[in-house]
Image (cartoon, rainbow, N blue to C red):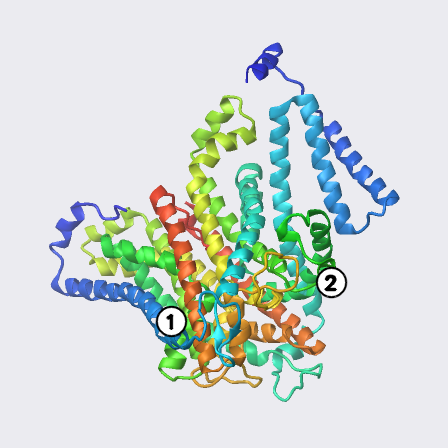
């Protein structure tokens, strides 16, 4: 960013004294604000660790492998089932959201006329603006009953895949399950992935696309040859950011997941839990050790999402793609 | 490739499907699905739409494959895929907004907006969200009062002063901060403000958590807008002997003001619907509680969340109406921000 040309420094040498003092005060002020960002992130890590320590020390069973959550009663608790459910529901949501998000991003930039493309951008961003608690309410009262058909279909035809296995009786009734949570999560992370992918695809050099078309490529071949390869890092980071959002989503998941503590890959059967949903559901009844245990689980979530985001940002920075969008 | 080349060599214009034929195939596929649903035990509107879509795509691709060849068929399949993705994106949005308006509209009255839940039993049909609206507005306003000035200063540092390692590091940390889950921000304020400093539940604690979520959005949008301000404007100001800080305050910020306002409004829209932090550090209150610094305070997202978990149908009705209120606030903010963008000469460039 070369906002200031070299000649400007010569002019500034003649600045009056008072404005130089103003410069020092103002730049100092912005520097303090910048330093506050460091302090804030540091404080988040420190205070979460400090308040999680009592729970980590008093744990009667191993925090990483225990599948139950009873800190205030028997004192047994652990994040095994929670981490499993968090990762499973997020990965499942990604497999549903990524193809659709990429499709809609490509459609917005490459297929739709310019004006309609811009309108579609606004509309998909609006999907991101709907509060998560509204998605939760909608998921609980609209989506769950309407998912029964899909669940029956998946269980009836694809039960040989362990993911869709499970007792028929369980699947027939609408139920709070990992599958329902994944569908809600997919809807919620779709606009983020679509928005970033859209910006990345829009930045592809038009000359490359025109060259591909001039050589007789169909539109799909043009996308495959000229658009996808240069956008890949941006799209990968978009997917990672979507994953980060899915891992930490709380309220919508809390309303449609089973809130049980079992490790089961049968996503259609009632049950399942995630770290964030467990915090929302258990916080109200938690005693002092219970709150500490919930903070400890939140620390685990913080570290997981931090890692995912660091990877996403690393991919972006290395590729030099600017993916900034107001939606994220 | 050689086979394709030899087929192209035959004539300069390859065979193409006429549009009427394409329309006919689509109509035929839909008709066939109708027939299937009439004579077999298949039923249901959703099932019909899925089956018809699948059949149309198969038929169109198949016909293109037969007439125009493999490359054109794959191209048409990709187009169908992109269109399908668009429908799959718009469908949940339409269903969500439509259903919220349908369910929420029943209880969405003037009475609902102007009454609190004071003394209203869960099993009574009356009551409203006045107290929750006040709580949400106060908390979000307070969060913005913290996050917007701080975010602006950080953005100015990063763009105008921070052309060094420290500046790059802050940019990176801000990007990382956008990924902090809202529940973690809530837990931090719980651990720091409520538990370590023994301040107890309050709207202010919620505002602290919301400001953590708002800060990175403000910084990123402000940073982007400040970078768009042309260097020539700054140089003209410097050439007139104006100090750097005065140039920033009097020239750069006013030029970027529209874009920054848009970013701030989007940030506010985002945090207005946040439930998780409010759930952890604000508590709940059925009464009108205007003191944002002391004691539990109601808020719209929490009102919706608790209504959703209630066993009383009246609570659930109220939750839907509150959800409609919340969506209206967010959508108004969002649309206003977008309209403002249109008048933004920098972003149009």
- Position of residue A201 relative to residue A159, above or below, is above
| Rendered location of residue A163, percent (x, y) | 62, 52
Image quarter of the C terminus of chain B: top left
Query: Of the numbered discs in the image, which one, if any, rests on residue B116?
Result: none
Query: Which image quadrant for residue A206?
Result: top left
Mark 2 or 1, nearer chain start: 1
Q: CA distance from mark 2 to mark 1?
A: 40 Å
Residue B109 in view of the camera: no
What secondary structure is found at the residue carrying circle 1?
A: helix
Number of disc labels: 2
Front one among A113 and B16: B16
Q: Report if residue A326 is visible in the image.
A: yes
Q: Measuring 64% from the left and 46% from the top, which residue is drawn there?
A: B87
**Pointer 2 with pointer 1, Cβ within 8 A:** no
Residue at the outermost bottom position: B119
**Where residue B301 sits in the image (x, y, percent)?**
56, 72
- Reading the image, the residue beneath label 1 is A48
Residue drawn at the location 70% of the way across and 83% of the way down = B123
Residue A258 at x, y percent in the picture: 62, 66
The outermost residue toward the front is A61
| Residue labelled with disc 2 | A173
| Label 2: which secondary element | loop
Residue at the top extreme of this rendering: B10
Residue sitting at the far right: B39
The quadrant in which residue B328 appears is bottom right
Quadrant position of the N terminus of chain B in the picture:
top right
Q: Left or right: A300 with respect to B312?
A: left
Chain to which mark 2 belongs? A
* Residue B139 relative to residue B309: left or right: left
A276 displayed left or right of B156 = right
Q: Nearer the viewer, residue A45 or B132?
A: A45
Q: Is residue B224 above or below residue B75?
A: below
């Amino acid at each position: 960013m070369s906002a200031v040309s070299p000649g400007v420094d010569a002019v500034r040498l003649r600045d009056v004294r008072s404005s130089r003092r103003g410069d020092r005060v103002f730049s100092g002020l912005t520097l303090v604000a910048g330093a506050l960002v460091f302090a804030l992130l540091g404080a988040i890590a420190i205070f979460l660790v400090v308040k999680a320590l009592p729970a980590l020390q008093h744990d009667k069973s191993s925090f990483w492998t225990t599948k139950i959550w009873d800190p205030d009663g028997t004192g047994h608790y652990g994040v095994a089932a929670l981490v499993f459910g968090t990762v499973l529901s997020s990965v499942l949501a990604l497999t549903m959201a990524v193809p659709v998000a990429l499709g809609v991003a490509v459609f917005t930039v490459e297929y739709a006329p310019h004006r309609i493309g811009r309108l579609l951008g606004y509309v998909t961003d609006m999907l991101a603006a709907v509060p998560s608690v509204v998605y939760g309410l909608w998921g609980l009262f609209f989506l769950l009953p309407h998912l029964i058909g899909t669940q029956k279909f998946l269980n009836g035809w694809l039960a040989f895949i362990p993911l869709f296995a499970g007792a028929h009786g369980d699947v027939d009734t609408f139920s709070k399950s990992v599958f329902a949570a994944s569908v809600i999560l997919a809807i919620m992370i779709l606009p983020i992935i679509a928005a970033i992918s859209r910006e990345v695809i829009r930045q592809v050099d038009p000359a490359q696309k025109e060259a591909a078309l001039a050589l007789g490529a169909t539109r799909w071949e043009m996308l495959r040859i000229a658009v996808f390869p240069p956008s890949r890092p941006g799209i990968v980071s978009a997917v990672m950011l979507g994953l980060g959002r899915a891992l930490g989503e709380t309220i919508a998941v809390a309303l449609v997941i089973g809130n049980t503590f079992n490790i089961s890959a049968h996503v259609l059967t009632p049950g399942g839990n995630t770290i964030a949903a467990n915090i929302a559901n258990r916080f109200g009844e938690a005693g002092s050790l219970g709150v500490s245990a919930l903070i400890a689980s939140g620390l685990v979530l913080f570290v997981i999402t931090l890692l995912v985001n660091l990877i996403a940002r690393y991919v972006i920075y290395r590729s030099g793609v600017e993916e900034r969008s107001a939606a994220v | 490739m050689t086979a394709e080349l030899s087929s192209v060599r035959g004539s300069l214009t390859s065979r193409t499907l006429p549009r009427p034929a394409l329309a006919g195939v689509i109509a035929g596929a839909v008709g066939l699905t109708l027939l299937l649903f009439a004579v077999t035990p298949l039923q249901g509107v959703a099932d019909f739409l899925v089956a018809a879509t699948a059949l149309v795509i198969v038929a169109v691709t198949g016909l293109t494959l037969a007439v125009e060849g493999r490359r054109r068929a794959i191209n048409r399949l990709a187009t169908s895929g992109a269109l399908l993705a668009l429908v799959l994106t718009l469908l949940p949005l339409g269903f969500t907004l439509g259903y919220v308006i349908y369910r929420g509209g029943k209880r969405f009255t003037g009475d609902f907006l102007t009454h609190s839940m004071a003394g209203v039993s869960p099993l009574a049909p009356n009551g409203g969200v006045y107290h929750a609206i006040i709580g949400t507005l106060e908390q979000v306003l307070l969060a913005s009062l913290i996050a917007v000035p701080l975010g602006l200063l950080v953005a100015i540092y990063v763009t105008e002063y921070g052309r060094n390692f420290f500046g790059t590091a802050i940019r990176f940390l801000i990007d990382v901060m956008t990924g902090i889950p809202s529940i973690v921000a809530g837990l931090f304020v719980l651990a720091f403000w409520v538990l370590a400093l023994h301040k107890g539940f309050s709207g202010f604690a919620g505002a602290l958590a919301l400001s953590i979520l708002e800060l990175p959005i403000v910084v990123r949008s402000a940073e982007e807008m400040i970078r768009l301000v042309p260097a020539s404007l700054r140089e003209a100001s410097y050439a007139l002997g104006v100090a750097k800080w005065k140039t920033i305050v009097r020239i750069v910020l006013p030029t970027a003001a529209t874009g920054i306002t848009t970013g701030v409004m989007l940030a506010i829209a985002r945090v207005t619907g946040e439930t998780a932090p409010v759930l952890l550090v604000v508590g709940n209150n059925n009464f009108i509680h205007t003191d944002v610094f002391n004691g539990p305070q109601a808020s719209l997202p929490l009102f919706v969340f608790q209504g959703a978990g209630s066993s009383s149908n009246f609570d659930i009705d109220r939750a839907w109406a509150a959800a409609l209120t919340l969506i209206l606030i967010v959508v108004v903010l969002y649309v206003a921000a977008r309209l403002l963008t249109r008048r933004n000469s920098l972003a149009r460039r």
